[in-house]
Image (cartoon, rainbow, N blue to C red):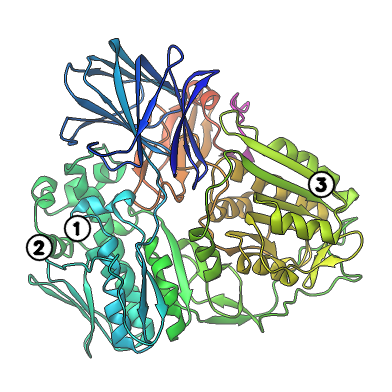
Amino acid sequence: MTITFEETTHPAGLEVYDSLEQRHLQVKTDGVVSSVTDEPEGFRFPVNKTCTIETDELYFDRLFSVTLHDRTGRSEANFDVGETVALDERTQFVGLSGPIKLYCRTETAGTVDIGLTSIRITLERESTIELGARSLHDRPAGTITTPPDVESMMDAISVLPSALKTTSPERTWPTLRGHPPLIELGERLEVPDSIDRPDNDHGITVTVPPEYLPLYQAAPLAFFLGATIRPGPEPKLETPQFEYTLADTRSFGDDIARLLKRFFFLDCLVRNEGFFQYDLLELSVLEDELPFALGSMYETPLPARLERYLEIPYEVIDSHAPRWPLTAHVPDDPESIELIPFVVNELGLVREATGTVADAVSSADPSNAQLVRSAAATRSPPSVTGDSEFVVPTVTDESVEHAWFGDAVPQNASKATIEAYRNQLDRGARSESIEILLVCNDARMIDEHDLLDEAYGTREELPFEIRSEFGVSSDRLASLLSEGGYDFVHYIGHATEDGLRCPDADLDVRSLESVDVGVFFLNACRSYEQGIALTRRGAFGGVSTYGDVANEDAVEAGETMARLLNRGFPLRGALEIAQQNSSLGDQYLIVGDGSVDIAQTDHGAPGIIELERRNEDEFGFSIRSYSTKEFKLGSVTESNLKSVADRHLTPGFTPFSGVEADSIQEYLIWIELPILIDDQLHWNDGVGPAII
């Protein structure tokens, strides 16, 4: 059972729990309630479970996006911080978008008050309220088998759009794009009955050369458009309305990437005329430059809509589109077909796994350090045993994360493994608390442990269980990794390519049959091989190092990563911020899946506040947001600072707006986002840093 409702007494109300994603949502009431949980038959919205209670008040001590729907489910309005909404004496649904999607069905008049950090629904009298909850977890509908010939693979990839829930502009909302079916190599093409082949009523096709790489590059665009891929000598996008010629050289990938970004972004603007309407920052900037009316475009059939989108010069929209979360660098071979559904699930851009062979990444100069986190007797250039060379991908600047699936060891990119993605699909229900293990295997590094013990689990609304172990033997560490069931493991100590240092001997993770670990941070020198081994034996993803790291730098890196992960950042966002604003250098890299996290955010997508001091009375204010598994590409987020209109597409960033210093100081009291001011990273634990 994915969703459960549990009655609570302190505080009175209900706790909604998603056992697959370990997400919690607390619903407080004005008194203890009795609940009746039921299956969702007949509920207007797609939900996993419903629950009925009698009360006259619901209170949420976190801020969610609020939408009001009529009895048919159609959206009537969206609301902002500070607004009070009247509920009529009729059937209405109050939709709350948070770590768990929640709908509150009521037939009684009342109000919805949206505060700075909370939401209160008050009814005129005690009434029956039906709650429907939906997990944001999404699994593939099945696995397609294909032989390794290109045309069969084209047929297989053309089935991936079966996961789209609509071809209207609404498909830019993450919850209306399901996880595509998986693909595996086999003897013949087989599509299971559990997968409905897409109809492609719009007649859209993408013609590509009969080669592996162009096929893989076209897959995300074909998925988003619900298109069929077919072979041909002249690459093109074809609809009943128009034909658009694509490059047939190495710039083919560039053409595909631009089309995907263009169509996705403009659909995000047009969808604003649909069920959910927001005052988008991007729309306020671009609306006057668009050669069409958004209202008429929303009802326009997809082929005609795409044709109008092509009228807009790409340069007009490029700087306003969301930051793309992922570029996948994949080998040009048949085995890469099995990676594609995972990349398409994020609408990732696809590039060939080629680049410039590089010297080993330089280690931080530890000449002034008293301690280096290497188990080796002497310091030497970084090396790896499983891969032959270091490489810098040809493209490294178009996405938040560049995931390298090739054999070499990447620089300026993460080292992705398909096992890390598959491990998450196999994940079963977890305990309600987030289980964290801190292992410190060198007493001289105790300072990092003490900082971590303070950084993890400081949020009262989330149940963390933190376990610390010191001087762990190799057998004990093997048991903790294999049987502990930890959501996050933070290792502090020494490592070599051949193992994690323990008092009695090194533990080589490659000697373990499997591990029961979600996310990890191996804060030790040369932990790359051990991190790869963790992902190939059950882990989802983590951070490792290629070379030597001075202890004082590692302490700062460990604390920075811990604070960011604790605030709900995914690995890719946390590592980017840490590398830009701490001593965490190029020796650190993500291995596995960079989109994984360990905790939910307080409200909306995680972000970092950027402030620039203009004078004693004014600051420039901006926010940089990151996508997560809950708030994927196409989500909307804002800072909730009343004087700033910064509701924008995630992941993205907003231009600086002038804000009075007093308003900033008051705002920082209520949020716990990290703050960058005067090029210094500050941690806000709810009282606000002294900035004036």
Disc with the residue nearer the chain's start (2 vs 1): 1
Estimate the x, y position of residue 644 in percent, counting from the top left: 38, 31
Estimate the x, y position of residue 503 in percent, counting from the top left: 91, 59
Viewer-proximal residue among 444 and 105: 105
Span colored in magenta: 676-692
Q: CA distance from mark 2 to mark 3?
A: 62 Å
**What residue would you read off at disc 2?**
304
* Residue 469, numbered label: 3
What amino acid type should be assigned to the residue bearing mark 2? Ala
Estimate the x, y position of residue 632 in percent, counting from the top left: 40, 51
Viewer-proximal residue among 606 and 101: 101
Regarding mark 3 in the picture, which secondary structure is present there? strand
* Residue lying furthest top: 125
Mark 3 and 1 residues: CB-CB less than 8 Å, in contact?
Answer: no
- As drawn, is 363 to the left or to the right of 609? right
Secondary structure character of the magenta stretch overall: loop
Q: What is the quadrant of the N terminus in the image? A: top left
Regarding mark 2 in the picture, which secondary structure is present there? helix
Q: CA distance from mark 2 to mark 1?
A: 13 Å
What amino acid type should be assigned to the residue bearing mark 1? Thr
Q: Is residue 679 magenta?
A: yes
* Residue 167, numbered label: 1
> Residue at point 50% right, 64% down?
421
Q: Is residue 346 magenta?
A: no
- Which is closer to the viewer, label 2 or label 3? 3
